[in-house]
Image: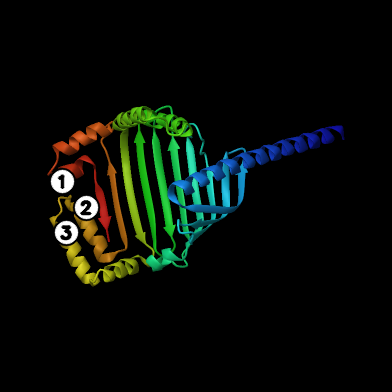
Amino acid sequence: MKRLLIVAGLGVMTFGGYSYANYYVSKEARKDVDDYLLQLQAQTGLDVRYKEISSNFFNQSLALNTVALKGPDGVQFADIGSIELAGFYPVQPSDHTRMAIKDMTFMGPMVVNIQELEGERINVVSEFNYSAANGDADAKTVINAGKLADVELRFAMTNSQALMGLHQQFEELDKKGRGNLQQQLALQSQLMTAMTEVVPKSFSFKLDNNGKLKDLIQRVVAEQGMTYEQFQQQMQQHINMSPTPQGLRDAALGFIEGTEQFKVSMALPEGTTVAQVNEQMMSLMGQPEELAKYFNLKASGK
């Protein structure tokens, strides 16, 4: 019986400690979030309000529930069921960060300008993985815009330690009121250098029509005083005259014809820095097919 009481007592203490820690994190998170949202509103005019905030002590995540977005004019243009954030640390980059926006619906001025969004629930998931050991980093963003479209974007790079290391310096400078001009210029110079040392690995983009995408394009075209057929002819002329690889032109023309799907991907030679990529692009200027081979460009459209 004593053992059971001891186990039960430990369980209560553990749960109580977790609950208190979770409460403390939630309290601190609310303050940080409120401060950030006030700053965001001051800089952009975007007013973000939420009804509830919750956090998880173990995985350092938080969630804003029942979120309303208003523009600088004070008019609400969107509702969001929840915004979940995980792995976002204020000082150093995390090995895994994730943001999920669930059940976002637009209203008012947004659906006036983009009628096809009315009644649609938008979901966004964005993830970023990073290894401080070798600078490997990859990002993925998936957007489901209801019956309008699906969008997927992926990017991978390595040797990004210097670039990611500047994150802390920018955060510290921001806390000091962005510092003086000399400090800002010094960090910007470091940023440019760090970017040239990054080794990009791959990139891909995919767009799928879920049913309403062609309706949106047709409406926008009609507002320009053209039929869709006239738009197709005009785009075909522009694409055929552009200095782009044949494969990319064929993919673009295929998408304009069918508006079902468009995909493009690239994979750079291993170990090639951004500086080397820029040099190669300059040397192959005016040779689109050679550039396509260099980037291992693949594209399709239908």
**Lateral position of residue 184 relative to residue 40, left or right:** left
Which amino acid type corresponds to the residue marked 3 in the rendered image? His
* Residue at 52% from the left image edge and 39% from the top image edge: 87
Please give the residue where the numbered disc 1 appears in the rendered image: 289
Please give the residue where the numbered disc 2 appears in the rendered image: 248
Q: Position of residue 223 (x, y in %)?
A: 28, 70
Q: Position of residue 241 (x, y in %)?
A: 13, 56
Q: Quadrant of residue 111?
A: bottom left
Quarter of the C terminus within the rendering: bottom left
Q: CA distance from mark 3 to mark 2?
A: 13 Å
Which amino acid type corresponds to the residue marked 2 in the rendered image? Leu
- Residue extending farthest right: 1
**Lateral position of residue 183 relative to residue 19, left or right:** left
Upstream in sequence: badge 2 or badge 1? 2
- Towards the viewer: 258 or 178: 178
* Mark 2 burial class by Cα count in 10 Å: few <14, some 14-19, many 20+: some
Asked if 12 appears above or below 256 in the picture, the reply is above
Please give the residue where the numbered disc 3 appears in the rendered image: 238
Colour convention of the picture? rainbow
Question: From the viewer's perspective, is the residue at label 3 or at label 2 nearer?
Answer: 3
Which amino acid type corresponds to the residue marked 1 in the rendered image? Glu
* Mark 3 burial class by Cα count in 10 Å: few <14, some 14-19, many 20+: few
Residue 56 seen from this side: yes
